[in-house]
Amino acid sequence: MSLASKTALVTGSTSGIGLAMARAFAKEGANVVLNGFGKPEDIETTRTAIESEFGVKAAHSPADLTKPDETEAMVALAVERFGSVDVLVNNAGMQFVSPVEEFPREKWDLIIALNLSAAFFAMKAAIPHMKKAGWGRIISTASAHSIVASPFKSAYVAAKHGIVGLSKTAALELAKDKITVNCISPGYVWTPLVEAQIPDTMKARGMTKEQVMNDVLLAAQPTKEFVTVDQVAALAVFLCSDAASNITGANLSMDGGWTAA
Ligand code: NAD
């Protein structure tokens, strides 16, 4: 178990990619700090399942990461409960779709706050603990949209490009501290969020489920396959291994060839 006695803090881990990552780190022996929204009873079920399945400790921080003070409190909770933050995954994110000239100011601010600034504040709070421990891994879930754009996603694309720049900068600053800083950039990942869009799109466009998946959702993804949350989580676990100690400042694509085109 490569992460035994380490602590992994994964933001936005009450569902989707973040939850798969938290579970994968726990499987490797790490204590985990979950973060994100949801029904308290569902979060408690998720938390206790991790503890009983993997024999580790799991905590939950309800921090709203659009608020820097709450982001700092989340890191403080991890340190208080488990002694440090060895692995920080900046994963929480949201989307809003609108032409630039109509994009609501508050949506722009919210997406930049969650998808970009929260990563900065979490890193700022966690790095001193990683330096003290002499080891650390910072991973951010970026997106294919950190490399290419799509219309109507200005805030998301700007934030995802930004998190790559932030990560490269931190990677250079921390290069001699045994702390690596990388991004993972998935294409379309099969999450409950994506699945839930299918019936509405079928109705709106008069398409079959297969047509919606291949011609709408996977239009840009040459493999015509969704990435799975477990594949993203496996890459995150690899980035925490000794074999990955010289991967830093990288933006690793997992997008079925999307950004090769
Ligand atoms: P998801 O909606 O399943 O999960 C998002 C998580 O973020 C949830 O746990 C939610 O509670 C949490 N969250 C939302 N607002 C928050 C806030 N203000 N403070 C704290 N937590 C908050 O989404 P997902 O598909 O698993 O996406 C996770 C990350 O992966 C995001 O950064 C997203 O941009 C990125 N991504 C997703 C895909 C995809 O196809 N699903 C593709 C590329 C990148």
Image (cartoon, grey):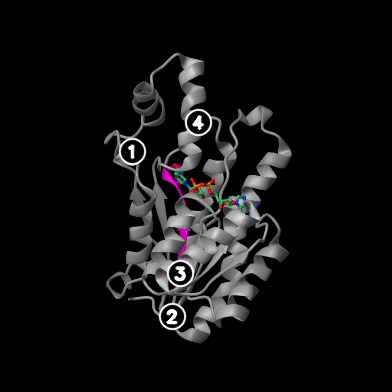
Query: How much space separates mark 3 and mark 1, taking CA atoms?
Result: 38 Å
Precedes in sequence: disc 1 or disc 4: 4
Q: Which residue matches tag 4?
A: 197
* Whether residue 214 can be seen here: yes
244 over 154 or under it: above or below: below
Q: Position of residue 219 (x, y in %)?
A: 36, 28
Splitting the image into 4 quarters, where does residue 247 fall?
A: bottom left
| Residue 47 numbered tag | none
Residue 35 visible at all: no
| Dot 2 crowding, Cα within 10 Å, few <14, some 14–19, many 20+ | some
- Write down the residue under mark 2: 135
Tell me, yes or no, whether the two marked residues, 2 and 3, touch with CB atoms within 8 Å: no
The segment highlighted magenta reads 137-147
Which residue does the numbered mark 3 point to in the structure image? Answer: 52
Residue at position x 69%, y 46% in the image: 109
Cα–Cα gap, marks 2 and 1: 33 Å
At label 4, the amino acid type is Gln
Q: Between residues 100 and 19, which one lies in front from this camera angle?
A: 19
Badge 3 element: helix
Q: Residue furthest top?
A: 206
229 vs 246: above or below = above
Amino acid type, mark 1: Trp
